[in-house]
Image (tube, rainbow, N blue to C red):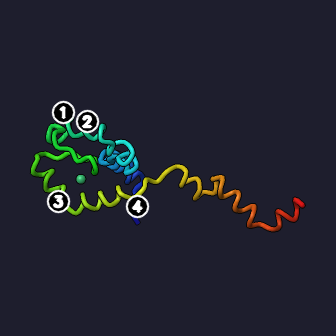
């Protein structure tokens, strides 16, 4: 009977996947909503200096999707695409804030007040 399982078969493989995930990661929706869509910031993003490291020399940038395009026609067709329209719809919804996250976790002030009112046993002990 040979070896059933080779040890270290996936040695360091995980880190490659993590690296590629990090590389393709773009800006988060709330960052775009609160920072990039500001008219002043938008102007800066749309008129970037020529950068040889980015696709299309950083001259064709979609602010909403935080993505560079090679040519002007590629950007134009992207604006008509489903991906871009879906993104516009997502950006219309309010950003997920820290306050909302805390309220969901029960850390918010209004949540604590609600539990005190709801629990009659606590009131009985206090009285
Ligand atoms: Zn777009």
Percent x, y of residue 61:
21, 44
Percent x, y of residue 55:
17, 42
Q: Are marks 1 and 2 in contact (CB under 8 Å)?
A: no
Distance of label 2 from label 4 (alpha carbons): 60 Å
Residue designated by label 2:
44
Residue designated by label 1:
51
> In the image, 88: left or right of 123?
left
SS under mark 3: loop
Image quarter in which the N terminus is found: bottom left
Percent x, y of residue 42:
27, 41
| Earlier-in-chain disc, 2 versus 4 | 4
Q: Are marks 4 and 3 in contact (CB under 8 Å)?
A: no
Residue designated by label 3:
80
For this rendering, which residue is in front, 74 or 63?
63
Q: Is residue 125 visible?
A: yes
Image quarter in which the C terminus is found: bottom right
Which label sits in the foreground, 4 or 3? 3
Distance of label 3 from label 1 (alpha carbons): 26 Å
Cβ at disc 2 under 8 Å from ligand 1: no
Which label sits in the foreground, 2 or 4? 2
SS under mark 1: loop
Residue designated by label 4:
3
Distance of label 4 from label 1 (alpha carbons): 53 Å
Quadrant in the picture for residue 82: bottom left
């Amino acid at each position: 009977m040979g070896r059933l399982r080779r040890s270290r078969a996936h040695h360091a493989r995980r880190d490659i996947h993590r690296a590629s995930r990090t590389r393709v990661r773009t800006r988060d929706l709330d960052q775009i909503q609160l920072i990039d869509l500001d008219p002043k910031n938008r102007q800066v993003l749309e008129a970037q200096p020529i950068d040889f490291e980015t696709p299309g020399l950083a001259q064709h940038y979609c602010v909403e999707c935080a993505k560079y395009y090679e040519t002007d026609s590629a950007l134009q067709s992207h604006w008509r695409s489903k991906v871009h329209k879906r993104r516009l719809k997502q950006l219309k919804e309010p950003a997920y804030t820290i306050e909302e996250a805390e309220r969901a976790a029960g850390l918010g002030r209004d949540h604590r007040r609600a539990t005190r009112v709801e629990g009659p046993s606590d009131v009985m002990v206090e009285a």
